[in-house]
Image (cartoon, rainbow, N blue to C red):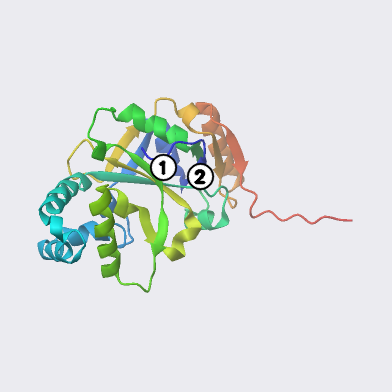
Amino acid sequence: MEKSSDTALYKYMPYKFFSKMLEESALTLVDPFQCWEDTYEGAFYRAIKDEETFNYLVSITRHKTESESVIASFRRLLLTVSSVKAQSWTKNRDDLLMWAAYSNNKRSIMVQTSIDKLNTVCKDNYPASIDALSLPWIHDVVYDYDRESSIQSDIIRAFDAIALSMNPYEPFLHKRTELSFEQEVRLLAADSNQSNRKTAKLRINDIKAFIDGVMVHPGATKQFAGKVCNECEKYGITYLGKSQKYDVSFLTV
């Protein structure tokens, strides 16, 4: 687990996902290959699964003199990454762009927690004795994919970087530069169940302690805001109210 701090994190989601989180007292992580729409996500691993592409990358990188050990390490990584699940958070609190991206007909929720609390969930679900490559990782996303650069050069760069660190999560931490407004932080973990399932659950032992607050979309109706408020009261969670980003006040002098 990479990060450890009390930095606040936020997740914008449809109400149904929020309600399910409370009901199950669990985080839902997804398979990046099956669930993320952006084809840049995981493009590196899709490329090296092809034998011809893999051999070409080995031949042109600075690690070609150690090709046998590099190949063996990457084979192991491919086995690990096939079970990777992920969840996205952001450092952006009550942000207009995030509300717009996750509007869900103005029925979306912003959940607040912290990196430390995410780390606690990870520790509760993964024993410290497991293989280091399988331990969860929490890390900032790096927005360094230039739209005008070729995907081939990005893959070559990633191949070199991973050959040095052998961290299977590294390729999932890079996104296009135009998405930098997201200020995303990702939770990545290996699924202990090696089946080809789309989602995996991490239990939350104390949902009330995990969630620091809940806010509703600035365009939410009074009825919807009341519904979320009641659900928060049911679980003893702090309700932060409706975002005021759409409110306009005129001051009289």
Q: Position of residue 101 (x, y in %)?
A: 48, 57
Type of residue at label 2? Answer: Ile
> Which residue is drawn at the image coordinates 35% and 29% (left, top)?
123
Looking at the image, is mark 2 or mark 1 earlier in the sequence? 1
Q: Which residue does the numbered mark 1 point to in the structure image?
A: 17
In this view, the residue farthest toward the right is 253
- Circles 2, 1 touching at the beta carbon (< 8 Å): yes
Residue 189 vs residue 58: left or right? right
Q: Quadrant of residue 62?
A: bottom left
In this view, the residue farthest toward the bottom is 148
Give the structural element (helix, strand or loop) at label 2.
Answer: strand
Towards the viewer: 156 or 228: 156
Q: Which residue does the numbered mark 2 point to in the structure image?
A: 109
Q: Residues within 10 Å of mark 2 (few under 14, many from 20)?
A: many
Towards the viewer: 69 or 184: 69
When the figure is inspected, residue 13 is found, relative to residue 97, above or below; the finding is above
Q: Position of residue 147 (x, y in %)?
A: 38, 70
When the figure is inspected, residue 103 is found, relative to residue 52, above or below; the finding is above
Type of residue at label 1? Answer: Phe
In which quadrant is the C terminus drawn?
bottom right
> Which residue is drawn at the image coordinates 11% and 65% (left, top)?
52
Q: Is residue 248 visible?
A: yes
Residue 82 vs residue 241: left or right? left
